[in-house]
Each structure stands twice: as structure tokens, then as C-alpha cells.
Image (cartoon, grey):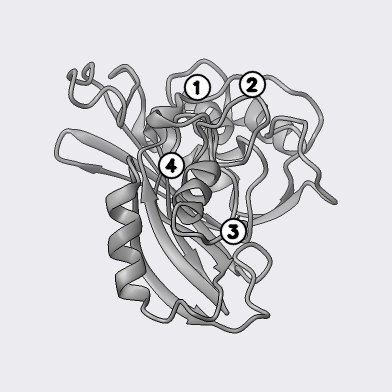
Amino acid sequence: MRVKAVIAYDGSAFYGFQRQTSTPLTVTQHIESALKSLQIDTKIIGSGRTDRGVHATGQVIHFDLPPYWQDLQKLKMILNRRMQAISLRHLSWVSDTFHARFSAKRRLYRYLFKTEIPSVFEEKYIAHYPEDFDRKRLLEALNCFCGEHDFRYFHKTGSDIHTTRRTIYQTRYYPYRQYHILTFEANGFLRSQVRMMVEASMQCARGIISIETLQAQLACKEQAVTGLAPAEGLYLSKIIY
């Protein structure tokens, strides 16, 4: 009996989403440990991985339950009491053919930053970039990523992937009160791809690199930007099936 769960988590409490041998402090292992405490021995599968320090408001996972567990609301309540820094937002029964990763059609990330140094209450959740950036150039840089591209120069290596081509359907930038928000919607993302795209876009907006240099990197001709935007500003916000 397969269950789909929409979850949120505070990425600052974990060493990333994916299971690791070097530490038990991952989102996956924390949820699996809570399930085992209820005599539910199952593996969870996520729609995608997030790096250490990256948050989620709409990550999707699936796992299989033994037939004697029928009350999903009760399960949600018990698990939320037993977990820290993770919240099960919604649980639902799905077909056994549902797969959190392979059934997903689109993924949406948001990136939040301030031009002022974030307060002690925000520093784990909001990134910081200086005020000296051009908003029009930022929009121009973000628009470069739209469409299907080979993002081999916009990701960290080490993942088991078949192709580095991805399609980005939409990018946005808008200010909201004292915050600045970037969004990326795509059919999928490579490891650390969003953080590298944010960093490259902000370097364009600050005049550190040109739009032409960004386009050359996107065309896999040269790699001018290798750094990553700070993890604390990134949120996996929605998965579309």
C-alpha cells in the first residue's frame, strides 16, 4: 500500500536529503527512523535531493505501508510528534505504480535573499547579496536559462545521471517587502544546478561577468562561474505530477 507525502523541512538541521553512510543526520534517515519506531520498516523515495542546508516547503516522498496501517491522519499526527525539523503536510493513498521521482513532471524552486545582512533569526533561512545589483540585468540573466539546454557547466559532478540536458519552463524575479525572490520551474534539476544559476545570475546583475559570458557557459564553451549561491536561501517549493 503506497503512500504519497508532501513534506516540509528545515534544511539547516540536516546534512542534506539523501541517505548517507557517514552520518544519520539526513532527512531520509530521520523519517525512516520515525517510521521504524512504529514497526514500519520501509524506505522512502523523494522527488529529488536537496543539498545540506537547503530547505523544502513542498518536497514529495513515497513509501509503502503494511496493510494494517489504514488511518493516514493518525499516522501523520504520530510521525509529526516524533520528528524534529520535518513536518508531514499531507498524506494520501496512491497507486503502487506512483513514483515520487519518476512520476514528477515539473519541479519548482524558490530562492530568497536580502540586501541587508539577515538578522540572527533569519540567517539560516535567507541568503545575503549586496545592494549593488541591476534588476534589469538580473532578469536578462535569468531569461537566458529558459528553454532546453545542456547544463553540464551548471552542476556539481558526482551524481548518477544519464543526461545533463534539462528544460526550464519559467524563471522569475520579484521583490517582496525587504526580500528578493527568484523562482525556477523545470522538468528536473541537476545537483546544485539552481544554486549555480543563482550565483551566475547575480554575478551578471552585479557586473562581475557579462551576459555574453553567461551565455558562453550555457553553450558549454567556457566555465566562468563555478561557485554556488548560499544554501540557506534555497527552497524546494512544489512538485507537479
The one of 187 and 96 positioned closer to us in this rendering: 96
| Mark identifier at residue 230 | none
Residue 56 falls left or right of residue 154: left
User: Label 2, on which residue?
Assistant: 225
Q: x%, y% of residue 28?
A: 54, 46
Give how far apart the Cα atoms at labels 2 and 1 are: 9 Å
Locate residue 84: give its quadrant.
top left
Give how far apart the Cα atoms at labels 4 and 3 are: 47 Å
Q: Are marks 4 and 2 in contact (CB under 8 Å)?
A: no
Q: Residue at the location (33% across, 48% down)? A: 82
The one of 83 and 17 positioned closer to us in this rendering: 83
Q: Amino acid at mark 3?
A: Asp
- Disc 4 is placed on an element classified as helix
Q: Residue at the location (78% across, 24% down)? A: 222
Q: Are marks 2 and 1 in contact (CB under 8 Å)?
A: yes
User: Label 3, on which residue?
Assistant: 41
Q: Residue at the location (44% across, 33% down)? A: 137
Q: Are marks 3 and 2 in contact (CB under 8 Å)?
A: no
N-terminal of the two: label 3 or label 1?
3
Locate residue 156: give its quadrant.
top right
Question: Few, some or many C-alpha atoms within 10 Å of disc 1 (few <14, some 14-19, many ≥20)?
Answer: many
Q: Amino acid at mark 2?
A: Val
Most extreme residue toward the left, as rendered?
177
The one of 98 and 237 positioned closer to us in this rendering: 98
User: Label 1, on which residue?
Assistant: 203
